[in-house]
Amino acid sequence: MATSHFFNRRLHSLLGIIPVGAFLLVHLTVNYMATRGPESFNSAAHFMESLPYLAVLEWVLIFLPLLYHAIYGLYVAFQADYGNVTNYGYFRNFMFMLQRITGVITLIFLGWHIWETRVQMAFGEELNFEMMTNILSNTGMMIFYIVGVVSAIFHFSNGMWSFLVSWGITIGPRSQRLSSYFWMLVFVLVSIIAVSALFAFVNPEYIVTIG
């Protein structure tokens, strides 16, 4: 039983980085092209959609790993003891709690985002700048997307810290502290970039003119 739990935790951690975390960064990069204008975003989105064997790649490299990571993550979240957070208030205990909360938020957000994009594409809609503009023009939906995207970035960044610890890469207190600073910096910077990309879909001021 202990061996099975150890294996599941390791696999859950690994899949959160490769390929799920890697896909998050690729997806955010495509979104960032919106800051270059509709044509740049549409070109990037079209390139991703034109990849050979896209359906197979999505299921093998994204949906199935994400499904395992989400299901086991929910199990860990609801089995976890959060008493230390209120009793001691240590930084890492809070980060542990936020990791579980943002995981649930991210899962809800991803489900809705897939419905608004991938499912609608199955009904004949085209994934392009206009589609995202129509979605994000609603203030409530923009707030929902900001919360969802920032939660996903935090979950990935803090998950990287946990991954490095659990896989024996950052062992001592100093290396773990430096890793914590680094990944929180990554969280802040990537969040700023990602939120700017969201605003670029509805506000021309966030679009950078090249040349």
Image (tube, rainbow, N blue to C red):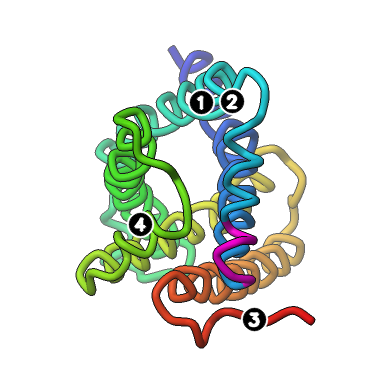
Rendering quarter of residue 193:
bottom right
Residue nearest the observer in this picture, 184 or 24: 24
Identify the mark nearer the N-term, 3 or 1: 1
Q: Is residue 63 above or below residue 99?
A: above
Query: Which numbered circle lies on residue 61?
Result: 2
- The kind of residue on which mark 2 rests is Leu
Asked if the stretch drawn in magenta spans residue 208, the answer is no
| Residue designated by label 4 | 97
- The kind of residue on which mark 4 rests is Met
Rendering quarter of residue 211:
bottom right
Image quarter hosting the N terminus: top left
Identify the mark nearer the N-term, 1 or 4: 1
| Residue designated by label 3 | 208
Q: How many marks?
A: 4
Q: Is residue 137 above or below residue 204?
A: above
**Labels 2, 1: front one:** 2
Horizontal relation, residue 10 to residue 86: left or right = right
- The kind of residue on which mark 1 rests is Pro
Q: Is residue 11 above or below residue 87?
A: above
Q: Is residue 73 above or below residue 158?
A: above
